[in-house]
Structure formats: C-alpha cells, structure tokens
Amino acid sequence: MTTPAEPAQPARPAPPPQHPADSLGFLAWAIALGILGFFMAMGARRSPWTVLSVVLLGVSLICFGGHVAAVVAKRHELWREGRGR
C-alpha cells in the first residue's frame, strides 16, 4: 500500500508583496521630477513657470516620502517576523 505524498514546503517563506512605492522606478521618477522642478525654478522668469516648478518639486517630495515610508514599513514588517536585521 502506498502512502500519500506530503505536500512540498518551500525552503524559505515567500517575501511580502512589494508595494509600488517600494520600487526603484518610483524613486527615479521622484528624483527626475525634483531635478526638473529645480531647474525650472532656477530659470523661471514668469509666474506660470514658477507655479509649475513648485508643483513639480512638491510632487517630487511626496514621491520621495512615499518611497521612504514604503521601505521603512517593509523593513519593519521583516524585522517583526524575525527575518530582518
């Protein structure tokens, strides 16, 4: 009589799902928007360009803050599970 095969268990637990703000692409967009906004602010001579540069700098800061928050949250979750440093 044969015994049923036991289900295979993974060698290590699966990583937590990646948040979109945790990606390097998100960080790259934040840096690119910040640089573009900075150069626009330095060369702005008229009011509409100044407003646009301030908006780009604001979006850049929000994106960068979101990226940092996602990385910190992921590391905290790994630390709580005992898999982090």
Image (cartoon, helix red, strand yellow):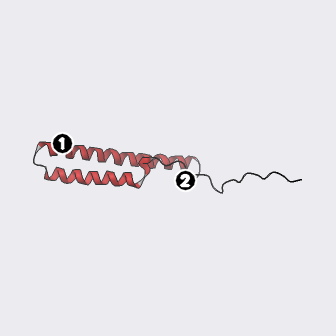
Q: Residues within 10 Å of mark 2 (few under 14, many from 20)?
A: few
Answer whether labels 1 and 2 touch (C-beta < 8 Å).
no
Callout 1 secondary element: helix
- Where residue 81 appears, x then y in whole percent? 59, 48
Q: Which one is nearer the viewer's eye here, 83 or 44?
A: 44
| Disc 1/disc 2 C-alpha distance (Å) | 43 Å
Q: Residue furthest right?
A: 1
Residue 77: image location, x then y, percent: 53, 46
User: 38 and 29: which one is in front?
Assistant: 29
Residue type beneath disc 2: Gly
| Residue with the mark numbered 1 | 51
Which residue was labeled with disc 2? Answer: 84
Q: Residue at x 18, y 51 (%)?
A: 40
Ranked by sequence position, the earlier of labels 1 and 2 is 1
x, y (%) of residue 14?
A: 59, 52
Q: Residue at coordinates 39% horizontally, 48% vertically from top-left?
A: 67
